[in-house]
């Protein structure tokens, strides 16, 4: 995310030998691709499931450029000016970061106080550039986009870069003084990079991605690969007058790597084991090939990735990345129909991000990057003495004081621990109740399975139901046959908090139902869950899935779930009603697609049934309230009964 000073033309490549700095315009194109990938991933994860890979590109460019400049400074001046280096980094990165931290915390203090948890630690660790380690122990998964997502989550990358900036001038100087040979320095850095990638693979835990995703040691390979490349591929020493065949090789390598990266943006699942066991490393290696071709003056890749749009976005990529999450999270907290109008809301969010970024770029980043901080006291005195003559500065000063004051209030009012909402308390209570009922339900499940093979199905008559069953049937809008079938059906229900919310009703109608639910559960966790249930002998002939509330479902994940459950079982998959989240449409399309692909998969279309019935839901418009749970349970019972009767008739 570093910026250089002088625009480059082909004729000015040689100026590097005179010690002049230049700006490789194609890197703006790379920054644009990287930040667009991240933004699209956060807005519409189902459309670009590998968009998070923009971060390794940023790391790679930083590693290359910073190392390149330090080596050039050493060769030009015979040493490295540490204070100057740190001063440039602070002036470049700190003003916008502090602005974002103060502005976001002030907003949270005023309007979204549930996010004040850990606010002191969050702000202070960001200022010290150790937030990534704080996030490992205090933050939720980067891929959990539903449960109280923090507007600071994405700042882990800045902490890793900050740690890199702190130590890297010293490392480069030591390499230049004691290793001396640039090829050996490159090999040494690559060896450490590979060790970092190996650490990522070894420490990978599907139940806790935070350690490998946020850890400096497991993410440093991208920066180190860029740094290693700077020792043997410094742009200022590369010749522009190369042969046509060499130019063709460079261009071919650049285009192939670019296309491969774009393909991986669309296909590399951020929660797949393969991503952390080599996938992200090889993505970074391909990125290094692209960076190398863009940096080479004899290649055409720099020109290919240079245009006014890329230049505009690239120069503002730091601000775009910085402000994206606060804008998205605050906007989506206010707008409750994101999933129903995805394109319109995405355009509005992008516009807001660009508006905030532009204001920051013009009023904060650019002015303070070139500001002489030694004049601070004098300038403040002038503003205080004559505020009318310095209107813009006065306004900014007042806003700063307000944001700082509100941040201080937020610090003081930080809750000691998270206070569960009424809905969370209800879900927790029902989860505990379901666990207790599961013991009896598992026994009932086996008895029902044996009885099903002997008992002949007869249509039930409502008047012959017991008084208690008549009340149950009326409450859940069921016929006698639907109730009797449900009571006689062994069922394993697997899902997330929506399932837990309904567990009491579900087990009332399906006494042979074992419920396995978990708050925040995503499709990536399902293979382990299904395997565990199967090992306990609780995977019934009928399986209810309620997965998709908390994130996207890929085709591979859907296929894996169906394969793990098995072709001999009837699978009933409930569509997601998550109008507040962008993945609603993708999840439901995947459920319908999977049902068409597998004969034993059937759709329970809760989304269509519940759409528009806001009175059925809690305040989040996602979890059914007690009234909504009647309809939710009813739909499940009716759909399962209809399908089982159809299966029986077909035999």
Image: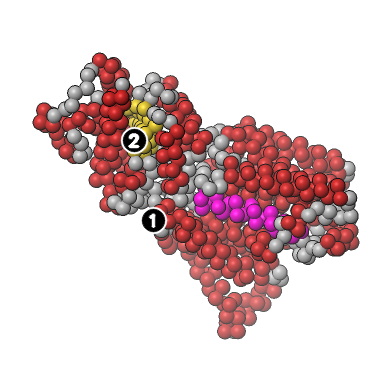
The residue under the point 59% across, 76% down is 393
Q: Residue at x 62, y 70 (%)?
A: 362
574 w.r.t. 619: above or below: above
Disc 2 and disc 1: Cα gap in Å? 26 Å
Label tally:
2
Q: Is residue 257 visible?
A: yes
**Residue corresponding to mark 1:** 336
**In terms of depth relative to the viewer, which is nearer, 631 or 196?**
631
Q: Residue visible at 71% across and 35% down?
A: 195
| Of 364 and 244, the residue lying toward us | 244
Residue 170 visible from this viewpoint: no
Which quadrant of the figure contains the C terminus? Answer: top left
Q: Position of residue 159 (x, y in %)?
A: 63, 50
Tell which of 58 and 117 is nearer to you. 58
Helix, strand or loop status at disc 1: loop
Magenta residues (range): 24-45
Q: Residue 134: give x, y in percent of width and height.
A: 56, 46
SS majority, magenta: helix
Secondary element type, mark 2:
helix
- Please give the residue where the numbered disc 2 appears in the rendered image: 431
Residue 268 included in the magenta stretch of the image = no
Q: Position of residue 544 (x, y in %)?
A: 36, 32
- Residue at point 45% right, 33% down? 597
- Location of the N terminus by quadrant is bottom right
Q: Position of residue 281 (x, y in %)?
A: 68, 39
């Amino acid at each position: 995310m570093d910026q250089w000073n002088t625009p480059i033309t082909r004729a000015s490549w040689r100026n590097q030998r005179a010690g002049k700095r230049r700006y490789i315009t194609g890197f703006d194109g790379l920054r644009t691709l990287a930040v667009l990938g991240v933004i699209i991933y956060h807005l519409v994860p189902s459309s670009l499931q590998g968009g998070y890979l923009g971060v390794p590109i940023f790391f790679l460019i930083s590693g290359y450029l910073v190392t390149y400049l330090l080596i050039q400074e050493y060769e030009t001046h015979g040493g490295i000016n540490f204070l100057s280096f740190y001063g440039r980094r602070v002036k470049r990165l700190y003003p916008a970061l502090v602005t974002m931290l103060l502005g976001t915390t002030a907003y949270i203090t005023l309007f979204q106080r549930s996010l004040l948890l850990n606010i002191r630690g969050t702000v202070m660790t960001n200022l010290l550039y150790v937030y990534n380690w704080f996030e490992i122990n205090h933050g939720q998964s980067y891929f959990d986009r539903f449960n109280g997502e923090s507007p600071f989550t994405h700042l882990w990358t800045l902490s890793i870069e900050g740690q890199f900036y702190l130590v890297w001038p010293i490392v480069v100087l030591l390499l230049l003084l004691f290793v001396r040979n640039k090829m050996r320095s490159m090999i040494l850095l690559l060896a450490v990079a590979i060790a970092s990638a190996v650490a990522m693979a070894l420490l990978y835990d599907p139940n806790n991605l935070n350690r490998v995703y946020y850890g400096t040691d497991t993410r440093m390979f991208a920066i180190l690969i860029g740094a290693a490349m700077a020792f043997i591929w410094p742009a200022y020493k590369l010749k522009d007058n190369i042969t046509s065949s060499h130019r063709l090789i460079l261009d071919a390598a650049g285009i192939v790597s670019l296309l491969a990266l774009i393909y991986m943006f669309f296909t590399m699942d951020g929660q797949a084991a393969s991503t952390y066991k080599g996938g992200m490393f090889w993505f970074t290696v391909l990125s290094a090939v692209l960076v190398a071709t863009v940096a080479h003056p004899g290649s055409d890749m720099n020109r290919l990735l240079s245009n006014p749009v890329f230049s505009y976005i690239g120069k503002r990529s730091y601000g775009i990345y910085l402000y994206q999450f606060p804008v998205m999270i605050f906007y989506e907290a206010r707008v409750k129909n994101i999933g129903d109008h995805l394109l319109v809301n995405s355009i509005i969010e992008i516009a807001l991000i660009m508006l905030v970024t532009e204001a920051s770029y013009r009023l904060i980043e650019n002015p303070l990057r070139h500001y002489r901080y030694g004049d601070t006291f004098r300038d403040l005195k002038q503003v205080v003495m004559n505020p009318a003559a310095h209107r813009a500065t006065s306004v900014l000063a007042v806003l700063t004081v307000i944001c700082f004051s509100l941040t201080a209030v937020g610090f003081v009012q930080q809750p000691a621990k998270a206070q569960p909402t009424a809905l969370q308390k209800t879900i927790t209570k029902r989860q505990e109740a379901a666990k207790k009922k599961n013991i009896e339900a598992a026994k009932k499940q086996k008895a029902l399975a044996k009885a099903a093979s002997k008992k002949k199905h007869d249509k039930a008559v409502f008047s012959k139901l017991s008084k208690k069953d008549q009340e149950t049937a009326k409450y859940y809008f069921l016929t006698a046959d639907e109730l009797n079938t449900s009571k006689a059906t062994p069922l394993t229900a697997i899902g997330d908090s929506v399932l837990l919310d309904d567990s009491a009703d579900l087990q009332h109608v399906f006494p042979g139902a074992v419920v396995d639910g978990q708050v925040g559960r995503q499709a990536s966790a399902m293979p382990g869950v299904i395997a565990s249930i199967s090992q306990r002998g609780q995977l019934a002939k009928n399986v209810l899935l309620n997965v998709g509330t908390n994130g996207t479902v890929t085709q591979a994940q859907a296929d894996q779930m169906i394969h793990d459950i098995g072709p001999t079982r009837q699978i009933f998959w409930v569509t997601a009603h998550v109008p507040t989240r962008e993945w609603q449409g993708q999840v439901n399309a995947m459920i319908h697609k999977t049902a068409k692909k597998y004969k034993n998969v059937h759709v329970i279309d809760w989304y269509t049934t519940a759409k528009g019935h806001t009175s059925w839901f809690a305040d989040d418009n996602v979890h059914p309230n007690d009234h909504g749970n009647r309809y939710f349970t009813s739909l499940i019972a009716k759909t399962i009964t209809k399908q089982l009767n159809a299966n029986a008739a077909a035999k």
